[in-house]
């Protein structure tokens, strides 16, 4: 096998609470995360060199890229003397709070493990991933999970009840460090009750889950688009409407696909980058190889 292709999903934060500051200066979090069916497609090819391409994207393909960081962390952890040629086809918007960069890192780790038959376990890959970014372990595991600490304490949850998300990316994005700096300055009174949200998940109760959905970073994000987008989502029948992660994407939760599609149509009059997505149960995974001769 000379190449593998990995699909790595975006995530949404069903909740996000900030619980404190860790000794290393990172914020400690308590959140419910969900992977959704918007995928980065990452192809890895054996090579003696380390090379990255992101066709159609203006994210720089340099040493700061999460895909490169993940490859270096993988080779460092395994001691493997090899390279890789990485092609990332981005579908997840950048600076959206949807963990696109973390999905790319997760895809590289899962892909290199398969490509070189390194035999790393999922917890071992998560440990390497955490060195690249706080959301990488969740991007590897996927599904529905409660994520605590600095992103390192993951507890798988029962699947999210059947629903659709209308996700809207306003123009421009939000930088994660800036979002946290503004939070430190302004604070917030918004603190989701994650125990209640977890109980709602356990009971498969979408309405009760939506009642707990909120994001402690939303007030300080000061993104002027959040209010109008959330208003359109609520007017269109969303059970909850909130920002994901550190922004800038905002989403609404719908019981049925048709209403979610109507909300998208309404949003697209003002915000072209809108999607209807649904929960998916797994994180970064290798696509099965095509049978020989099939294009
Ligand atoms: P999160 O939800 O994990 O906070 P995000 O959606 O806020 O993620 P990303 O889009 O993952 O943010 O990354 C934002 C920044 O990281 C950008 O400024 C970008 O230049 C840099 N970056 C580095 N590598 C990548 C990558 N592979 N894809 C996207 N952005 C990357």
Image (cartoon, rainbow, N blue to C red):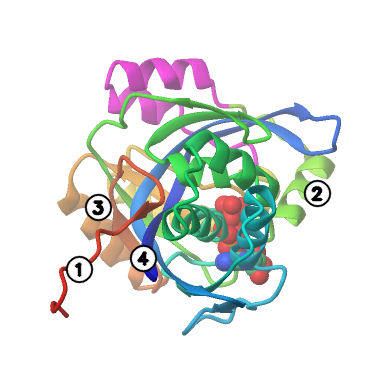
Eye-nearest disc, 1 or 2: 1
Q: Which of these two is toward me, 230 or 119? A: 119
Which residues fall within the magenta stretch? Answer: 192-217
Asked if residue 60 is positioned above or below residue 274 in the image, the reply reads: below
Residue at image point 69% right, 60% down: 175
Label 1 CB-ligand 1 distance < 8 A: no
The answer to whether residue 285 is left or right of residue 215 is left
Mark 1 and mark 2 residues within 8 Å of each other at the beta carbon: no
Residue at image point 56% right, 57% down: 105
Q: Earlier in the sequence, mark 4 or mark 1?
A: 4
Label 3 CB-ligand 1 distance < 8 A: no
Rounded to the nearest whole Å, what is the CA distance between mark 1 and mark 2?
Answer: 47 Å
Judging by the rendered image, the residue that carries numbered circle 1 is 290
- Location of the C terminus (image quadrant): bottom left
Residue at image point 38% right, 70% down: 3
Q: Secondary structure at mark 3?
A: helix
Circle number at residue 5:
4
Mark 4 and mark 2 residues within 8 Å of each other at the beta carbon: no
Q: Earlier in the sequence, mark 1 or mark 2?
A: 2
Q: Position of residue 155 (x, y in %)?
A: 49, 24
Rounded to the nearest whole Å, what is the CA distance between mark 4 and mark 2?
Answer: 37 Å
Circle number at residue 260:
3
The image quadrant that residue 286 belongs to is: bottom left
């Amino acid at each position: 096998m000379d190449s593998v292709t990995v699909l790595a999903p975006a995530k949404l934060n069903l909740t996000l609470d900030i619980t404190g500051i860790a000794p290393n200066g990172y914020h400690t979090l308590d959140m419910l995360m969900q992977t959704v069916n918007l995928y980065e497609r990452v192809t890895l090819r054996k090579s003696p060199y380390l090379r990255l391409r992101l066709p159609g994207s203006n994210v720089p393909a340099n040493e700061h890229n999460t895909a490169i960081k993940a490859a270096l962390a993988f080779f460092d952890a395994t001691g493997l003397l090899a390279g890789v040629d990485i092609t990332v086809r981005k579908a997840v918007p950048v600076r959206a709070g949807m963990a696109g960069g973390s999905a790319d890192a997760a895809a590289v780790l899962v892909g290199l493990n398969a490509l070189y038959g390194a035999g790393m376990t999922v917890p071992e890959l998560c440990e390497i991933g955490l060195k690249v970014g706080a959301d990488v372990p969740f991007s590897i595991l996927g599904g529905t999970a409660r994520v605590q600490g600095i992103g390192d304490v993951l507890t798988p949850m029962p699947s999210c009840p059947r629903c659709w998300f209308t996700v809207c990316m306003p123009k421009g994005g939000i930088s994660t460090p800036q979002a946290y700096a503004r939070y430190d300055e302004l604070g917030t009174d918004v603190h989701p009750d994650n125990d209640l949200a977890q109980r709602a998940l356990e009971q498969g109760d979408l309405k009760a889950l939506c009642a707990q959905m909120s994001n402690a970073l939303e007030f300080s994000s000061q993104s002027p688009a959040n209010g109008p987008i959330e208003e359109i989502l609520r007017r269109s029948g969303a059970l909850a409407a909130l920002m994901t992660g550190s922004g800038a994407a905002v989403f609404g939760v719908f019981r049925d696909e048709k209403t979610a599609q109507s909300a998208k149509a309404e949003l697209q009059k003002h915000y072209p980058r809108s999607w209807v997505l649904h929960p998916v149960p797994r994180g970064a995974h290798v696509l099965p190889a095509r049978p020989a001769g099939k294009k």
